[in-house]
Amino acid sequence: MTQAGPETPAGAQDIVFDHVVKTYPNATVPAVDDLSLTVPAGEICVLLGPSGSGKTTALMMVNRLAEITGGDIRIGGRSILDLDPIRLRRSIGYVIQQTGLFPHLTIAENVATVPKVLGWDKKRLRERVGELLELVGLPAGEYGRRYPAQLSGGQRQRVGIARALAADPPVMLMDEPFGALDPITREHVQDEFLALHARIRKTVIFVSHDIDEAVKMGDRIAIFREGGKLAQYDTPRTLLKEPADAFVARFVGADRGLKRLTLTRLADLADAGALTPARDADAALPQLAADASLRSALSLMVAEGTDAVRVTEPRGPADGSDGTGPVLGVASLDAVRKAGAA
Amino acid sequence: MSAQPVIPDYGDPSACVARDATFCTDWFGDHWWNLFWPALVQHLELTLIAVVAGFVLAVVAAVLCHHKSWLAAPVSGVTSFLYTVPPLALFQLLVPVTGFSVLTVETALVLYSLYLLFTTILTGLREVPEDAVRAARGMGLTRWQILTKVELRLAVPSLISGLRVTTVMTIGIVAIAAYVVDQGLGSLILKALQSPFNTQFIGAGALAVALALAADGVLVLAGRLLTPWARTRRAA
């Protein structure tokens, strides 16, 4: 090994769809029609759309589970058509709904699948599996020898993510990975994945049919309409503020204003100096931690019939407190509305 | 078919034999090594060869039909037709071709085994969760790796249940094969059928039953060892 210095994760690579067309045999209309978009390295791009809009096909073309019939896809500048599909797939993380874990293999064996076919030696394999299971919060000592059926849905999904990361791929494809989870577990696993992504910074393409999930997970969202046409590709903020057409506006929903409020936290208001100092008279106002979104703040105002909330320093139960910290100020309805419209 | 005397000369009769009792343990014990044991081993050999050959053929056929689904109907049709022909008739049909030989017996046994083995293996392959196969493809496993490391492994419970039924059935049909070759427990039964002395026929029959039970037990055990994941499901 000539490589020196601390080990760095494989650099993320951008993914470019260049006038991609997919027409299935015997189909008269393309499943994906002239798709061009660039996913910058290290970002999460959510492919969103109704069923039959070609979003899953678009995903499967990246690892050649579906072969493109026109145009090109490049990962880090290199056309996927230049690589043997088997080798290409081994260099791309793949997570699907229900995880697709192998029920006959233990958790550790599942995670080791790709490194094993790549011919890693036993020691390196064991170390990598331990490291990954630790990363997703399922220590190998406790979970490694269990079988998928012995885990909860959320735990299985975390194993699916660990398995996809096993060979440290620069790119990950996730096909409705959290679709089968109950809402509470889904929220939790989404948060965990975002925290994980902040550390590993892979380029991720993520298929979803849920606008709320897309707004939460995506750095960018690509909305597809029927016929495999890209309707709009933008950041969640722009998408919600300026839908390109009636289809996108309808798809993101009449409450897109409210959805945009989820993108801003009370802490952002505090940073922008949009909070007013708390007075004694404000003691009766409902209070909310600063890591809550503006949508939560608005919801609380509506529920409590007030036109402002007190914003407190976020404190976890780990601090031994009751979860609230010192008051940062007061967020008024007006401030929330202005921030939401910005 | 056999030129040997119907009641062979087994030497001086014991008291039990002289009394013509239903079952003479002493006679059974005296003839264990020269009569029953060799027949039992032959019976097992005839069964094993047929089941192993049938299994290999059925796996190949099932894998082909799993990938080319249009093949499944014709293959299923032919094997189920073979399964409906009475064993004696099938032996009779093959004798002009391959003679009174072990080859005739094994050919017939393999043709019989195909239907049950093929059907259960194909069912097993079709019941493999689609997600697991899609994930395996997406992770870059080759078709061969998907077949051997995922599909066939997950089909093990079906393979075992197919093997169990087929093995027990084959042990039964091997007993009839004595009409073609002078081998196995069937041969002892056939020779004793005309005799008023019952020990040989009862002993050989009981051994065939014991062999079937033992083989079934071994397969059940093998199935458990090969599917450690299946037992955890209840615990989960």
Image (tube, rainbow, N blue to C red):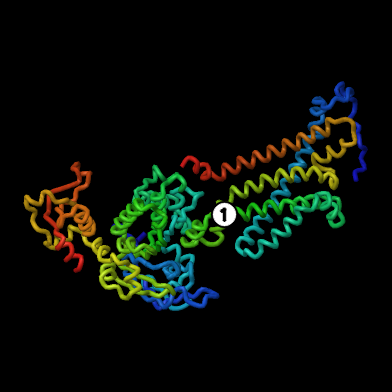
Which element type, helix, strand or loop, lies under badge 1?
Answer: loop
Residue A42 can be seen, yes or no: no
| Residue B55 point in image, percent of width and height | 68, 52
Residue B35 can be seen, yes or no: yes
Q: Would you place residue A255 above or below residue B188 in this image?
A: below
Total residue callouts: 1
| Residue A84 point in image, percent of width and height | 48, 69
Kindly identify the amino acid type of the residue bearing the numbered disc 1: Glu
| Residue A59 point in image, percent of width and height | 42, 67
Q: Residue furthest front?
A: A305
What residue appears at the point 45 percent right and 52 percent down from the top-left corner?
Answer: A110
Front residue of this view, candidates B132 and B214: B132
Q: Would you place residue A101 above or below residue B15 in this image?
A: below
Q: Is residue A175 left or right of residue A271?
A: right
Quarter occupied by the N terminus of chain A? bottom left
Q: Residue furthest top?
A: B15
Which residue matches tag 1?
B127
Chain letter for mark 1: B
Front residue of this view, candidates B197 and A299: A299
Q: Is residue A289 left or right of residue B152?
A: left
Quarter occupied by the C terminus of chain A? bottom left
| Residue A81 point in image, percent of width and height | 46, 73
Front residue of this view, candidates B51 and A153: A153
Q: Would you place residue B232 above or below residue A160 in this image?
A: above
What residue appears at the point 73 percent right and 59 percent down from the top-left corner?
Answer: B78
